[in-house]
Image (cartoon, helix red, strand yellow):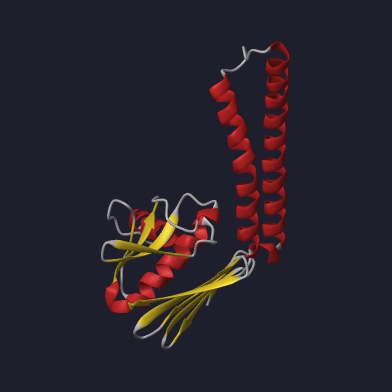
Amino acid sequence: MSNRDGGRVRIRARPEGLTVEIRPLARTTGGRAGLAGASALVLGAALYGASHLADVWEAGLRTGQFSDLPFPLLLGLTLAIAVSTPLAFIGLAALAFAEETIVVGPEAIVIETAAFEKKRVRRISLTEVRCWRETYLPLAPWWTWAVKRLAARTGARFEPVAGAAGPKDKRSIGLALARATGKPLLDDFGRALTDDSSEAEARREPRSAGSGSMRG
């Protein structure tokens, strides 16, 4: 059994397969601190941008012309702040309370995701899975704030998994799923991914053996 992030991500090997549990970020001290920092950053950026745009609007309406910024650009920036700020907070709220369970059985993988008090269950046959993919493709869910995604490749489709996990946890989950299913974990270029710590240990062993022979 492997626990990461203070117990937030739990990977448990079972005789009949594997279970991965991703608990809500708000349940960990570090997660709460990170969410508070991100919220403060989003709010500060929104207030800073809005205050400057308000000055430009005021000056333009008072003089009847917008010389500081062209009107289309000013309108676009104002709409961007008005739309993106609420979406950012909705994404943070979803990320704070989202949880996911991935169960690998003898014949299928069951993915259960809960967010916004809604539960979604997906079932993927093991025979349909070609590989596991670490990808930068813009896969769902949109609220994860993650650039790197983890997905199961089934034919021409990608089934995203572990959306609420961080990059390091995604790698650990991907490797565990690869071992449990016998399907490789690949990157966007088709290269097989392995445990970084295992690679580092493998690189150290030949040097250690070489230094031992020199001493002999």
- Give x and y (percent) for residue 32: 71, 58
Residue 90 higher or lower than 61, as above or below: below
Residue 108 higher or lower than 194, as above or below: below
Given residues 78 and 104, the one toward you in this image is 78
- Give x and y (percent) for residue 53: 67, 25
Report whether residue 208 is seen.
Answer: no
The residue shown at (36%, 86%) is 106
Q: Quadrant of residue 182?
A: bottom left
The residue shown at (26%, 66%) is 155
Given residues 196 and 183, the one toward you in this image is 183
Position of the C terminus by quadrant:
bottom left
- Give x and y (percent) for residue 107: 34, 84
The residue shown at (27%, 77%) is 127
Given residues 178 and 101, the one toward you in this image is 101
Residue occupying the far front of the picture: 64
Given residues 155 and 166, the one toward you in this image is 155
- Report whether 113 appears left or right of 109: right
Report whether residue 25 is seen.
Answer: yes
Q: Quadrant of residue 144?
A: bottom right
Residue 15 higher or lower than 163, as above or below: below
- Report whether 142 appears left or right of 191: right
- Report whether 168 appears left or right of 216: right
- Report whether 208 appears left or right of 164: left
The residue shown at (68%, 53%) is 35
Residue 127 higher or lower than 49, as above or below: below
